[in-house]
Each structure stands twice: as C-alpha cells, then as structure tokens.
C-alpha cells in the first residue's frame, strides 16, 4: 500500500509516495538520492544511518519512512550551507576525526544532538554520547577531540560579541 | 628525530598537514559502491544456507519468479553451463561460486535472485524453495583429522583426508636438541580465534556490461582492483571477458583491513548476471552476510620456549593447526601459505627455532583474510609475546627486564633471524625504555605490589613486537605469479601542478594527502597542488593494491623514485635554461641553482613550463615519469606497548587503566595520520583481546552473526590511547619509511592479554586465550579458587 | 534486512487506535517507538500484516506527580526520561537504567511504554517496574483497566495486554522521604542487553526499618522476575550488611538464567548475587541521604 507523505528534508518541502515497509534510510538514499547517510549494520547498532528527525538524532535504518510524514529531517548534506562547514565538520577535519569517512556523517549527526543537549561535555560524556555510533578506523581518540573543539567553537558562537 | 626539509606551505615529509580527502566525506559526498546508481540497474540478493553441511536435493525457483519484479534466479547449474560455478583461490584451492550439489558452510550462497529493486529481491530470496538434506558438520579442526572423519572435499582429485597442507621452516632437530637440554622450557597452546574485519561498509559491487562495446565496468569494494581485473580475465576469459575490456573502479572504500582483498562469490555472480542480462547489477552484502564470510586468524598454536635459568632465550618451537574452513582461500603471496608467520621468533636474539603448520578443512566459511596484519603476523607475535611473559613468570623475572636482556641489539642490524628474515633496522631497547618512562613503569610496579597486599587484582602487560610489512621483493613475493611491486605515475603539468596516480588503493589511510606530501618532498611542489588518484584500472598504473601495510613501503617508494626521475630530467632543462652544464646544477627543495651562484636559479615550476615550451633540442618533451618499485627487502616496523589493567574479582570486569604505545615505523610522512592509524589499530587490537570472536555451535551455526552479538568496541570500551615514537629509518627504503597501520593491531592484543593474565597471576592463572571476557575471567578465577 | 510486506495505519487518537485494532484483528500490531518490533520484523521473526502506529497520539507523553503517584505517559521516550529533572531528582533509579539502555539515538525514539509492553525480560524497564510496584494502565475494546505489575508479565513476550489494549500510563508510588532505588546491569559492552540486571527499591521508616522493598531482575529468566524470597527476608527489618549478603545468596539461588554467549549459568548466578548486594547498598544509601 502506498502512502503520500510530506516532509521537510534539509529545509526543502518534499511530497512522495512510499510503501508501508520502506525504511527511512532507503527513502533518503534511494528516493531522495542523499547518499551521505549510510547503512552499516541493519540492526541499529552502528549508527552509520543517523539523521536528525525534528532535531533529534535517530537511526534511520530502524524507522519507517511513512512515519516521517510531517517531520523535519536533516541529513549530513543539510547541516551547513554549500561550501561551508558546520563547526563539527570543521573540527573533524582539524582533529583528524575521520579516516574512511563511512561512519562520519552518522557520527556528526549524532554529535549535533549531543552538543545541543550538553554544550560542554566531559570526555566521558562524549564517549557515552556517541556510544551508538561505531567507528572501525579512528580508535575514537580524535573523534573525542573533534567534539571538544566543536563544543568550544559553538560556545563561542553563542556568546554575544563584545 | 626527523627534520622537515620543506616549509609547512610546501608540506613535504614530517608535516601534519590536514587531509585533502576530508571535505567530500564531511559533506556526505563520498562515493561508496552502494552510492552508485546506474540507469536500469537491477539488484541481486543471495539465498543462503541455514545448514553448515548439506546436500541440495532441489531448488525451486517458481514462487520467486512469480513475484512481479523478480527477473531471474541464478543457480550453480546455470553457472555450470559456462563453467563458472567454481573459481580458483589464490593458493591453488577451489571455491564454489554457487553450489550444484553440496553446501559446505552455514550461510554459503545457494543461489542469487535478481530483481528490479532491493525490496523485491529480498522477497524473492525468501520465496525460493530449497530442499536440503542436512549432514553432520565437522566444526572442530582437530576432529577433522580423525581417521573416521568424513572426507569433506571428495571433489578434489587425490584428496584422501581433510588435511590441506603441511608447512615447516627452521631446523627441527637442532631446536629439539636445545629445548631438551634447556634449564627452563615453558609450553602453552595459544589460540587466536576466528574474527572478522567488520569494516563499517560491507562488501559489494555494481557490475555493468555493455553488450555493444563488450566492456565490463565494475564498481567494487576492492583493496586490489588491478589484481582482481587480472584474476577475472583469467577466470572468465573463456566467456569473452578479456582483460582490456574489464574496467574496475574501486571508489571510496568504507574501511578494508584485508577483508576487501578476496574475490567473493557475490562479485562473480553479479558480474555473470550483468554479462547475461546486459544490465547493471548491484550486489551489497548485509551485515550478517558480511560477518559470516571472510574470517581472519583461527590458529591453534602449540608453543615451546626454552631458556637458561637466568632467562636467556635459546630456542622457540611452534606447531600450529590452522582451520581454513571448507577451502583455503587465504589471500597470501603464493610462496607463503602461512603468510609471514615465521616472524614468530620476535624481537629477541637467539639461534634456534622451528615452526610447522598443518591446515585442515572444516564446515566453516573460508577466509584466511590478512586482517590488518601482514599475513599471519598477529598470530606469530601473540605466540612469542605470550611465551616470553610466561617465561618471565616462570623464572620470576620482571618481563621488561627479560625483554631488555634478550633484545636484538641496535648494532646487530641488519639481523638475520633464525627463520630466515633480514630485519632492516630498529632500536628495541630505546623503544621499550621510552614506553616504560612514559607510563611510569616503576611506579606501577610499586602500586601493583601494594594492591596485591590488599588482595586487589592489578596487572601490567608488555608487548615488544617486530612486524614484517611491505610485500615484497619480486624474487619471493607474487600473487598468482604477479610480482608484488607497486607503481606511481607522476605528471607535472605545464603550470607546475601535478596529477599522480598509483596502483594502491586507500580505504581511509589518507593516500591523497601522504602521496601528495611525498611529491612535495621530492619536487618542492606544494602538496595541495598535487592531485592523487587511485583505484581505476583504466587510468592508474598497475599495482597490487593496499594491504599488508604495503602502500608506504612500495607505493610511497615508487612515488619518490618517479619524482626523482622527473627531477633528473628537470636538471637537464634547468642547465639549458641557465646556460650552464648539467654538472653545475644543484637542487634544493623546489629549485635548481648554479653551483656557487645561488642567485642564478630556476624553480621547479619554471622548469615544468619549459618542459612543454622551451626544452633542449632533441629532448623528449613533457615532464612526467612512471616508476614500478620492486622493494629490495621487507620493512620491519616495531614497537613497545604497555598496558595497565584492574580486574574485579566478583564479576570478572576488566578496566583498562592506561595503554601506552611507542611505535618505530621509520621516517614519518605525516605524524597526524600516523597517530590516527595507531589509534585505530589499537582499538582493533582491544577488540579481539576482549570482545570479538566468531562463535559456532556443534552444528556449525554461527551464533553471533550481527552487531548485536559481534561486539565491535564503541568509544566507551575503547581506552584513551597514549602514543609516541622512536625513529629508526629503514636503510633500504628511499624515504627511510616503513609502514605503520598494522603494528597496533598486532601489538595490542598480547599487551592486553599479558596485563590481564598478570593481574590474575597471584591466583595461579598462567594463560587465557583471547577474547578475555569478564565471563572467562570469572570462570578462571573459580577454577583456581577451588 | 528488510521487513516483509504489511500495511501501515496511523492512529490519530487512542479511540482510533483501538477501533483500528478491532477492525484489523489479530494480524495487527501496535508500534510506538518501534525499536523492539521493527528489528524483529527486519529479521522476519515477526511478520504482522498490519502495523498501527500509535506514536502520533497526542497526550501520552508526560512525566508528572499527581496525588500519591508518579505518572508516566507511555509514549514518553527514554530520552525524555533521561532529561527530566523530576526523574533525576526523585527517581534516580530510572536514570541508572536509561543510561544503560541501548544508545542515545535509540533512546530518542524508544518509549518507556514500548519497553514494557514488548514483554521482553531482556529489556531494562520491567525489572524497575517490579521493584517499584508499578501499576500499568491500559485502554482497549473493553475500556480502561489497571493492571498490577505482578499480573502483567505472563511469559516469553507475553503480557496481560489483549490485542486491542494500548498501554497508556505507568503509575508508581510517589517518592517519599526514606525511599530510594538503584539499578545496574552487567553488559558485555555499552548498550547491550543485560548479562544480568538488578533493580532495587526500598522504603524505610523514620527508624530505618524497611517498610516496603522490591527487587526485580533483568534477563535472568524468560519473564521479568521478582525476588520475593529476598523481599520477604528484608521487609520489616533494619537492613544490615549481613542481611544484604543473605539476600544476595537468595538472588543467586532464585534467578533462572541459562548459559549463552553472555556467560554460563553459574557466572550469571554469581554476578546476580554481587549486583543484588550492590544495588541494595546503593538503594539504602539513596533512601537515607
């Protein structure tokens, strides 16, 4: 059975017909051609498919596309205007927080939510906060550093200019 | 320490320049195989066996074919018409592409469903009816050698039992004699379990055959695209897939670690399907399909280490049983069925060693993947490093002291090991001393003594390993006869910018940055003006690919040599431009100048322009070079790792308090990237040490075939790694570099195991096999408290 | 991994959900967060023909104290529980548990009601419910009902909920002075299901005597398990270290674990003892601070 859904993806309003069983991750990757969101495990363990749904990080491999009707979705393609970096993207680059890049979009989407709820996390809070996102390459040291740098930058941005 | 020759702006060797490849990954614009979408593309999904050993009585396609959108169900019989149902492995064994009669391991491919989309293909796979006749699987490799064990491979001519091959190296008689006369001999069976690389991207491909041009374009998750192209041409040449018509593109790879070297049946079926149907066919493994295929390790090693009562090591002997699953599909160099296992004598100076190995068939998946280690080095290092610790415990000597007393000394390099390697360079004492100082070894010894008085379990573990990487010299190393050189092609454009192409293939190692840095080092052209390309067999020079830490030892060396060829040509052009003889021209980074008159000079950019516009009469125009580098020897990175743990008696929980890794990988191209590689390798070291291992039941069923139960460490399990370096350049590598990414994966497991066993030693526990889980620790404590 | 075909229905209200369930019959399943059900559907262990999405029903997401009760709306997500100041201050046992359940992104979607209604003894919330003696409020074709937690879990993935019943609210006796609870589980790695988990809730009177106690076990039987014998031992007494150790021994005897990848039966019994003792100590500490 087809369902017509209307949602906002990276700020753009989209209406599409989807099957009941279509997973959100496939909708994003295959129907919208936003291939920055990846599939790594199918069992909601690895977090490569993490996106923001109404501002909260979720695992799009374990969410039906039809349920996103009316929602606002942000994927890695939509976190910063073209040609610019979100502070987290900049920090991952500066701190060498990525190797193969496959987990990176999910890791960044999760980190956006983490820093929103905890703008100044400790190393332990960061490690627990990204515990649903597996990275096989970096050993996490530099991902932690990336979040620390981004947290600092984002705090600065919030402070009123003197 | 290494002194940079170039400015930060040029960014040659030794500069931690930021990675050039990052932007596309950070913006979600990476191009992985599953991102490839071609017009009319179909999807392929495999039907897989629920049984480990079974006869296939029938395969009924009808219900599947009745589903709208299911276009074909391909079986072994279909492939047999083209003689494509079996394929050779790299080590002269054979592997089924699709079976015609017998299933040899759980989750083996039974047949393939081709459909218009992923969802329909999965429904089709569900609807295929297969009638199996299950048989009693052989799971235990020791039982596979029983006299009455059923013959698993009657298809192989002359095969009378389940034994695949015997291998040995060293002097058995002399080693036995030394062991029999030694003051002290410690023995242990050390098992390294089956594990999986578990890259976050699984394997897959998109095969697209054009019936008009006869070109076969394949996007593939491959670490070795050129070698795969040749293999395909050899395997499928008879149906018309000629090598010049095959183009393999390895796009961005989401982690490889050795798991993306082999040819998996899925690739071959997808290629065959596209060939037959004439449309693009995509095949992407799901996680479970990935985890149950392509294993690494699975060595049972009976070790004996002999020493004087003072602790001078005299001899090492190891007898191994290797479980290869139903076929030997190890991705090893041809002459090395056991890879570089003979590095098992370690970092120590003694004269006698003997290693032997028997490989057997069982009803398990094939693999023998060189998982982030240069072909069985992890197994070798684990064996010797566990035994050295056991010796230290046996004679009551501090394990650091024992190692210091037995190390090969700095002035003994190049060192001929008892099993035939020529270690290039190292300063093992300095490396261990640095690690001891960094962690505060003496203080931890005191703390441990205190804690033991209080009945607390604290352990300190050391591993001082020697790796052997960079396969390899053509006289010894080949894959299917192809020598294991690697290549670089450098083109300097008229404006002085560079396109550099390589036979290797990065899977996250940062080649687009580090290779550019080498060009910068050699030519003085800023690294950000050097475009690096790899992975497209139509454009890149032939090379054997990236695995076994070979890109720096071979590819980077090729880059340096190609750049030097260009520099030499530039010298002639500079002489012509400056109107002096070539002998009067000198080079400093980025520019040629006249001896004794440095104000008379031409930059590399001036010379590049002249190479296309104003070159000496008779000279071949252009400014480019290709180099195929055949290394004279392997490189021998080494390191000293120290780990401190605390173990909770009641629950067996293990807390890794500190982990210090000092690596010596020779000269360093990019310290930031090297450090990152070490971090990642360390987490892949704690993984098998404490968490990962593929478990089978007695019927051969895999018990943990998803990430719910195959426990890849998260940021919480992964400690805060502390790293450092000593630098002993490789004497034979053009840049003095060695390769690094595998060292931490090799060195971390024994350091962690040694630490945990040290913590438990007051209870009388002398050995535990990895993964050392809390449950295993608890069981051991119970067994030793009775 | 892709679920088999089914038909999706969005319930706009509780009434709508119940009506849909009645029309569609037993082949329909409710889905709230979906993090228990959808993974089973992707593995094709569950193949419902209809999914009734109850996650969009308004008014079922709240955490509030009313009268003598703490009331939690069933669609409250685990993350909302984690961020609630009321929970953090008055009911830290929830914070203990939520932090160890799956991971933050899963907790953004997974609901407390779903965690309980799934009837999985491996989920963390059921043992907390047992410890705090919750009452489950459900609404279905036969109206609203209130189910004491001890009547709720019937067996492996089986609960007292009838097919049309929607779990709407969880009621827990309000935090009083002298009460406290704690939860911990041993897990193979962060976010894993429990190798063994123990929830303890105690209520002490002014003299420090235990007036009420609940001990619930996670993943130590095919159903969430109450440790009645240990509760009986401790109730009406001042809980001494000696009694704590006795309760631990009972826990190791009365739990019903099986050997699996997480460890042997003996190991699980042993860590259940240790965890029971530790959670009793933590709960007492919280009750008296």
Image (cartoon, rainbow, N blue to C red):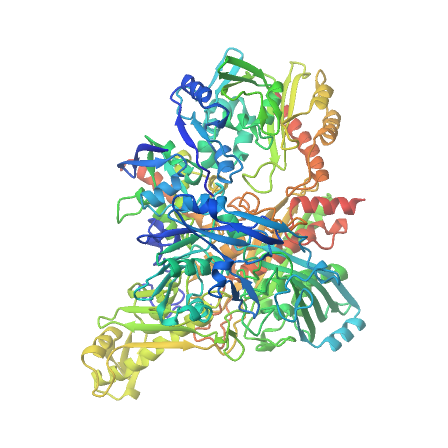
* Residue that lies at the very extreme toward the left in this rendered image: B613
Q: Is residue B729 left or right of residue C229?
A: left
Q: Residue at x 72, y 70 (%)?
A: B312
Q: Quadrant of the C terminus of chain C?
A: top right
Q: Is residue C142 left or right of residue B774?
A: left
Viewer can see residue B33? yes
Task: Name the quadrant containing residue B400.
Answer: bottom right
Labels in figure, total: 0
Q: Is residue C243 left or right of residue B18?
A: right
Observer-nearest of B639 and B506: B506
Q: Position of residue B636 (x, y in %)?
A: 54, 70
Q: Residue at x 55, y 63 (%)?
A: B95
Q: Position of residue C280 (x, y in %)?
A: 66, 27
Viewer can see residue B721? no
Q: Is residue A60 left or right of residue B682?
A: left
Observer-nearest of B750 and B592: B750
Q: Position of residue B146 (x, y in %)?
A: 74, 61
Task: Name the quadrant containing residue B251.
Answer: bottom left
Observer-nearest of B708 and C269: B708
């Amino acid at each position: 059975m087809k369902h017509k859904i209307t949602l906002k993806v990276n700020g753009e309003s989209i209406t599409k017909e989807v099957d009941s069983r279509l997973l959100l991750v496939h909708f994003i990757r295959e129907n919208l051609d936003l291939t920055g969101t990846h599939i790594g495990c199918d069992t909601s363990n690895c977090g490569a498919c993490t996106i923001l749904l109404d501002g909260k990080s979720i695992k799009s491999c374990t969410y039906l596309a039809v349920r996103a009707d009316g929602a606002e979705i942000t994927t890695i393609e939509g976190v910063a205007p073209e040609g610019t970096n979100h502070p987290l993207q900049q920090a991952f680059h500066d701190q060498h927080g990525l190797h193969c890049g496959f987990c990176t979009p999910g890791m960044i989407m999760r980190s956006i939510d983490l820093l929103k709820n905890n703008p100044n996390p400790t190393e332990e809070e960061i490690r627990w906060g990204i515990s649903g996102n597996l990275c096989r390459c970096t050993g996490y040291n530099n991902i932690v550093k990336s979040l620390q740098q981004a947290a600092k930058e984002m705090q600065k941005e919030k402070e009123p200019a003197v | 320490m290494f002194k940079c020759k170039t400015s930060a702006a040029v960014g040659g060797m030794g500069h931690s320049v930021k990675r050039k490849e990052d932007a596309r990954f950070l913006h979600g614009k990476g191009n992985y195989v599953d991102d490839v979408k071609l017009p009319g593309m179909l999807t392929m999904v495999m039907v897989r066996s629920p049984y480990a050993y079974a006869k296939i009585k029938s395969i009924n396609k009808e219900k599947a074919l009745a589903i709208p959108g299911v276009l074909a169900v391909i079986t072994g019989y279909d492939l047999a018409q083209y003689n494509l149902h079996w394929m050779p492995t790299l080590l002269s064994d054979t592997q089924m592409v699709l079976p015609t009669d017998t299933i040899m391991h759980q989750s083996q491919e039974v047949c393939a469903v081709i459909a218009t989309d992923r969802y329909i293909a999965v429904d089709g796979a569900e609807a295929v009816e297969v009638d199996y006749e299950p048989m009693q699987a052989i799971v235990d490799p020791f039982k596979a050698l029983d006299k009455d064990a059923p013959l698993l491979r009657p298809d192989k001519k002359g095969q009378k039992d389940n034994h695949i091959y015997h291998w040995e190296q060293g002097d058995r008689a002399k080693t036995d004699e030394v062991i029999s006369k030694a003051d002290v001999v410690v023995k242990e069976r050390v098992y390294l379990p089956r594990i999986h690389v578990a890259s976050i991207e699984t394997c897959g491909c998109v095969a697209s055959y054009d019936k008009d041009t006869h070109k076969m374009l394949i996007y593939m998750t491959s670490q070795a695209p050129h070698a795969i192209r040749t293999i395909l041409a050899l395997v499928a040449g008879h149906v018309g897939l000629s090598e010049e018509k095959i183009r393999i593109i390895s796009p961005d790879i989401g982690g490889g670690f050795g798991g993306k070297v082999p040819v998996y049946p899925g690739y071959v079926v997808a290629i065959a399907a596209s060939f037959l149907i004439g449309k693009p066919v995509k095949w992407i493994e799901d996680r479970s399909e990935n985890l149950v295929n392509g294993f690494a390790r699975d060595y049972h090693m009976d070790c004996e280490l002999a020493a004087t009562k003072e602790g001078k090591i005299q001899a090492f002997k190891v007898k191994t049983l290797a479980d290869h699953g139903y076929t030997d599909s190890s991705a090893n160099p041809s002459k090395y069925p056991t890879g570089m296992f003979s590095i098992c004598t370690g970092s120590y100076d003694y004269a006698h060693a003997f290693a032997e190995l028997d490989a057997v068939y069982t009803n398990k998946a094939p693999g023998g993947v060189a998982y982030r280690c240069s072909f069985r080095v992890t197994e070798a290092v684990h064996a010797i490093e566990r035994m050295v610790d056991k010796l230290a415990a046996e004679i009551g000597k501090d394990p650091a002291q024992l190692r210091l007393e037995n190390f090969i000394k700095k002035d003994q390099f190049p060192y001929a090991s008892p099993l035939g390697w020529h270690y290039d360079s190292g300063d093992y004492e300095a490396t261990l001393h640095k690690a001891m100082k960094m962690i505060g070894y003496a203080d931890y010894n005191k703390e441990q003594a205190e804690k033991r008085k209080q009945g607390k379990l604290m352990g300190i573990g050391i591993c001082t390993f020697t790796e052997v990487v960079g396969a390899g010299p053509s006289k010894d190393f080949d894959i299917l006869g192809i020598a294991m050189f690697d290549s670089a092609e450098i083109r300097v454009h008229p404006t002085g910018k560079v396109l550099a192409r390589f036979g290797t293939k990065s899977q996250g190692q940062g080649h687009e940055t580090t290779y550019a840095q080498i060009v910068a080092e050699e030519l003085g052209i800023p690294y950000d003006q050097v475009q690096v390309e790899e992975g497209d067999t139509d454009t890149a020079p032939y090379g054997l690919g990236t695995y076994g830490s070979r890109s720096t030892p071979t590819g980077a060396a090729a880059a340096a040599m190609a750049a030097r060829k260009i520099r030499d040509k530039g010298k002639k052009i500079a002489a012509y431009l400056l109107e002096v003889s070539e002998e009067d021209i000198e080079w400093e980074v980025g520019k040629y100048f006249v001896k004794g008159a440095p104000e008379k000079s031409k930059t590399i950019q001036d010379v590049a322009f002249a190479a296309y516009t104003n070159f000496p009469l008779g000279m071949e125009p252009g400014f480019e070079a290709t180099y195929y580098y055949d290394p004279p020897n392997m490189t021998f990175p080494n390191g000293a790792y120290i780990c401190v743990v605390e173990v909770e008696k009641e629950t067996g929980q293990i807390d890794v308090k500190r982990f210090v890794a000092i690596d010596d990988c020779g000269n360093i191209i990019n310290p930031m990237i090297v450090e990152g590689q070490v971090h990642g390798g360390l987490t892949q070291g704690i993984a098998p040490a404490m968490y990962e291992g593929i478990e089978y039941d007695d019927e051969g069923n895999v018990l943990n075939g998803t990430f719910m139960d195959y426990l890849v460490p998260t940021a919480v399990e992964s400690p805060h790694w502390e790293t450092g370096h000593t630098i002993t350049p490789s004497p034979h590598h053009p840049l003095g570099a060695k390769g690094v990414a595998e060292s931490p994966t090799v060195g971390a497991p024994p350091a962690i195991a040694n630490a945990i066993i040290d913590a438990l030693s007051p209870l009388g526990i002398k050995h535990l096999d990895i993964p050392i889980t809390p449950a295993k620790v608890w069981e051991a404590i119970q067994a030793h408290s009775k | 991994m892709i679920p088999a075909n089914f038909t999706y229905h969005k319930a706009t209200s509780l009434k709508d959900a119940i009506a849909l369930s009645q029309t569609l019959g037993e082949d329909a399943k409710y889905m709230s967060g979906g993090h228990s059900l959808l993974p089973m559907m992707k593995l094709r262990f569950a193949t419902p023909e209809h999914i009734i999405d109850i996650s969009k029903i308004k008014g079922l997401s709240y955490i509030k104290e009313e009268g003598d009760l703490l009331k939690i709306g069933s669609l409250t997500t685990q993350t909302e529980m984690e961020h609630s100041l009321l929970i953090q201050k008055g009911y830290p046992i929830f914070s203990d548990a939520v932090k160890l359940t799956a991971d933050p992104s899963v907790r953004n979607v997974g609901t407390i009601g779903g965690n309980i209604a799934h009837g999985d003894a491996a989920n963390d919330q059921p043992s907390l419910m047992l410890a705090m003696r919750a009452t489950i409020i459900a609404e279905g074709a036969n109206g609203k009902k209130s189910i004491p937690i001890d009547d709720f879990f019937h067996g492996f993935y089986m609960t007292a909920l009838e097919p049309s019943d929607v779990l709407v609210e969880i009621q827990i006796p309000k935090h009083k002075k002298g009460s406290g609870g704690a939860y911990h589980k041993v897990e193979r790695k962060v976010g894993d299901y429990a190798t063994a988990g123990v929830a303890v809730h105690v209520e002490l009177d002014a003299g420090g005597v235990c007036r009420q106690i609940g001990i619930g076990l996670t993943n130590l039987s095919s159903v969430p398990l109450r440790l009645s014998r240990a509760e009986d031992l401790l109730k009406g007494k001042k809980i001494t270290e000696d009694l704590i150790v006795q309760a631990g021994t009972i826990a190791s005897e009365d739990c019903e674990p099986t050997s699996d990848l997480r460890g042997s039966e003996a190991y699980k019994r042993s860590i259940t003892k240790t965890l029971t003792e530790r959670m009793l100590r933590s709960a007492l500490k919280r009750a008296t601070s």
